[in-house]
Image (cartoon, rainbow, N blue to C red):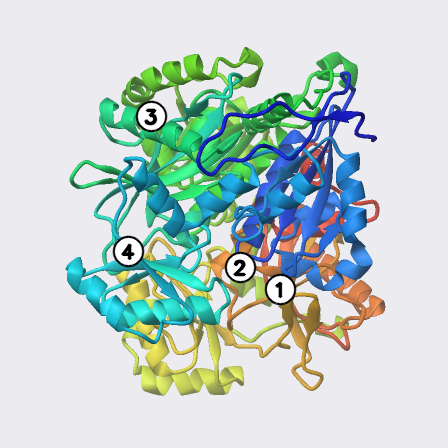
Amino acid sequence: MAAGARSKGKEEKHSPGASEPSSAKRLTSARSSLNVAVLCGGPSLERGISLNSARSIADHLSDDDIDITPIYFNQDKVPYQISRAQLYSNTPSDFDFKLQESARQLSPEALRELLGQVDIAFPAIHGQFGEDGELQKLLEDCKCPFVGSPSAACEVAFNKIGVSKLIQSHGFHSIPQLELREDNIHDSEAIQNFFKLHTLTRGIVKPSQGGSSIAVTSVRTPAEAAAAARKIFEQKIDHRAVLEPFCQGTEFTVVILENKSEEPVALVPIEVSMDYGDDQIFDYRRKYLATRQVSYHCPARFGEAVLQEIRSLAAKLFKLLGMRDFARFDGWVLNDGRIYFPDFNPISGMEQNSFLFIQASQLGMSHRDVLRYVLFHSCQRQGVALPETVTPKPEQHRSVAPCPISVIFGGNSAERQVSVMSGTNVWLKLKRSARYRPTPFLLDAQQQAQQQAQQQVWELPYCLALYHTVEEIAELCKDTAAREARVGPIRERIYQELAAPESFFSERHFTPRLLSLNTLAMESKVVFIALHGGIGENGELQKLLDSHGTAYTGSNSVASALCMDKFQTGVTLSHLEAEGIFSALKVLKSPSELQELNLEEIFPQFQSYLGQVNLIVKPLGDGCSAGVAKLCSAADLEHYLKFIQLGAERIPAHTLSDQSGIIEMPPSCPEQLIFEPFIETLRIQAQGAQLSWPKDGPRWVEITVGVRGTQGAMKAMNPSITVASSSVLSLEEKFQGGTGINITPPPESLVSESVRERVRLSIAKVAMKLGISGFARIDAFMNIDSGDIMVIEANTVPGLTPSTVLYHQGLAETPPLYPMQLLESFLDSALS
C-alpha cells in the first residue's frame, strides 16, 4: 500500500540523549488498514527472543485493519522480507540456512523502497543493532516512522557506562563501575584496585552494550572478573565490558508508556524474587524458561511510597533519556533504601508472558490492547493516519455463537511449568478464534485431594494467567483480596495518568473461582487438555471427562495410559519390525531395587544386554524431558539415583559425565526407571547460513513428528529433525523459545522426499497401533538412508508453547495451517 504524502514534522522538546526525529510525518486521510513492518532477528544472542516478540506482535496486532510485513535481519544485518510462517520458528537457526530460497533478500535500495511502502515500522530486535540506535538511524535515514525511541536516545540508553554517568550527573543514584576494554584486559592492576577500593566480595561483569541478561556473570575475585570479560571479548559479544559491585537489595522491573500528551507513565512495578546465593543471578534461563528458581510479584512488595518513587523516577529517566512510546527499565531497591536503575531497555521483550504484558494486564489490558495502544500512540505522535478501526460484530462472521471451551493446565508433574506455557499460549491464540471462546483453568499443584475428581481448579482472570509458574498463580488466586488492596490504588492512579479510551481496557477483573475438577468436567462442553504428565497424560482425566460425557482434545484414556508407560509402548510396537518400525531394547528397574545392587557389576550387565557403552535412563511414566539423562558409567548411575531418591528438583549442570545443562527431575521418586541404549546420531550443525553434517557420520537422526486425525485414521505431518547442543535434548531446547533448533521439513540434500514420505506413513501406523486420536507427537530416530524408524516415545499431550514444533509442521502442510487454525482443528476432532 502506498505511504501517501509526507511533510516535515514539528520540532520536538530537547533533552539529553534525544534528537529531533528524522522520520517525516505522514499526513494522510484515514485509511481502511495500516501496514506495519515488524523488524526482527539481528546479530545479537537475543535474536531468538526477537522472534518471540515479533510473533506476539503479529499474533495480536494483525487484523482486518492492520497488515503485518515481517522483515528479518540475519547475523550480518542483511535484511530479508520473510513470511509470517517463519516467525513461528523456535530460533533463526531453523531457517537461516535456507533464507536464499525461502525469503526475499533486500538490497539497501529494496529495503528503502519497502520501508517507503509501509505506514510505520515496529522494531522488535533486542540487543545490538536493535537497541543501540543503529536500526533507528537506518529508519530515520529512510524517513520511515517507527515505534519507539529515536536513535540518539537508544545509543545513550544502551551504553551502560555512558548512561550511568549521565543519570548520576542529573542527581540519580548510580554505583561504581570499571570499564574493561579488549585492548587492556591483560592489565590486571586496575581490576585489583577496583576490588580493593570498594572492598568487593562479589561483583558483576557484563557487556558494556548489551541486553540485561546475556553474558552477565557473577564474580568473586579479580581473576574471575578478568576471565569473564575475556569471554565477552572472545565470543565477540562486545569489545568493552563493565565491572561493578553486586547489588544488595531487591530487584524489580517497570514498563513505561507514553500518554496522549506525550508524558511518560510508569506501570505497576514487578519484583523479581530469587535466591542469589552460590553466585546465582537473574540470567537468561531464569528470565525466559519458567522455573521455581524465580518468582514475580506485581505489584512489587514495597510500601506505597517506594512504589510511587520507583514510578516517578522511571518517568523522569524516560524523559531525561529522550525515549518515546514505551520502554522497560530494570532496577534495584538497595538495602539502604536508595533506588538504582542499571539497565534501560528501549525495546521491551514481548514474548507471551513478558513483563510488558503482565504489567499491562493489571490495568485490564490484553496483549492486543497494549500493543495497539503503543502502535496507535506512536502513529498519532508522528502524524501517521490511523485506520477506521474495523470491529466486526459477531453476527457478521458467525452463524452461531462461539463454542465455550475450558483450557486446563498446571498440575504437579515435573513439566507443570511447561504446561502453564502451553495452556496460556493455547488460550491466547484461541481468543482470536471466531468459533471458540476459551477460558483458562489452573489445576492447583498444592491442593491434591485423595480423589482425582476433587482436585481443585482455579478459573483465572486475564491478569493472573500470565505468570510463569503453577505455584505463583495458585498463591495469587488465594491472595486475591490482599493483592487487590495493593494494586487497586496504583491502578486507579495509572488510569488517570494514561487518560486512555476505555477501548484499550477490554479485560474485566474478577475474583478467581475455585471449583473441583469434577465440577469443571460437569460444567464444560469441551476441555482442551494442556496438562503434561500426571493425570493429563495417564488417562485419569480422560476417564473423568468420559464419565460426564464431556468432549476433550487428544486420545482416550486407554491410549493415554498406554503411551504414558514407555515400556508398554515399546512392547506394543515390537511386532512392526518387518515394516521398518523398531523400538529400542529396554531394561526396567526400580530405584529401590537398584539401591540394593552393586552398581559396578550391574551397569556392565546393562551395557552388554542393551549393546551400547552409553545408556539413557528416564522415568517409566513421566513427560518427555523430566529425568532423562545420559549415563556413561556406574558412577553416573550412582549420582543419578542419589538425586532421584532425594526428590531433587534438578540435577545441576556437569554433574554427570556428558551433561552440559540442567536436568529437570520428576516431583517424586518414580516407581520404575527405564534403561535404553544411547543412539549415536548424525551431528548436524546450523551456523548462520550453513547447515552441515559429516558425510561419514552415523546415519540416524532424532526426529519429532506431529500426528492428527481421528482414531484409526491418523495422519503424520512433516517430520522435524531436532538438533541437540549436547547428547540429550534439554528442557530449554524442547520448550524455551529462541533456544532449540528444529529443521522442518528435513532438507532434500539430507533426506530424500521418498524417505520422508515413508517416515510419515510409518509414524501414522505407530499412532494407529497405539490407539492415538485427536493429536499427539511421536519422537523417534530415523535412518536417513532407509527411512527406518526407532520409536522413542509417544506424547498424547505434546507441548504447545509459542514456538513448538507442531506449529512449524502445521505451517509446512499443504495448504499451510497457521497456529490458531491448527488448534481449532484439534478442537474440531474432539467435537466430531
Q: Which residue is mark 4?
A: 244
Vertical position of residue 557 compared to residue 605: above or below: above
Q: CA distance from mark 3 to mark 4?
A: 25 Å
Could you tell me which secondary element the residue under label 3 belongs to? Answer: helix
Residue at left 82%, top 70%?
A: 752
**Can you tell which mark lies on residue 312?**
3
Crowding near the residue tagged with mark 2, few <14, some 14–19, many ≥20 C-alpha atoms within 10 Å: many
* Residue 506 visible to an observer of this rendering: yes
- Please tell me in which quadrant of the rendered image residue 633 appears: bottom left
| Residue 491 pos. (x, y %) | 38, 18
- Residue depth check, mark 1 versus mark 4: number of the one nearer the observer: 4
* Residue 449 visible to an observer of this rendering: no
Mark 2 / mark 4, whichever is N-terminal: 4
Q: CA distance from mark 1 to mark 2?
A: 9 Å
| Residue 792 pos. (x, y %) | 59, 66
Q: Amino acid at mark 4?
A: Glu
| Residue 49 pos. (x, y %) | 55, 49
- Residue depth check, mark 3 versus mark 2: number of the one nearer the observer: 3
Question: Total of numbered circles in the picture?
Answer: 4
Q: Is residue 39 left or right of residue 471?
A: right
Q: CA distance from mark 2 to mark 4?
A: 32 Å
Q: Is residue 826 left or right of residue 16?
A: right
Q: Which residue is mark 2?
A: 733
Vertical position of residue 35 compared to residue 103: above or below: above
Q: Amino acid at mark 2?
A: Glu
- Residue depth check, mark 2 versus mark 4: number of the one nearer the observer: 4
Vertical position of residue 207 compared to residue 641: above or below: above
Mark 3 / mark 1, whichever is N-terminal: 3
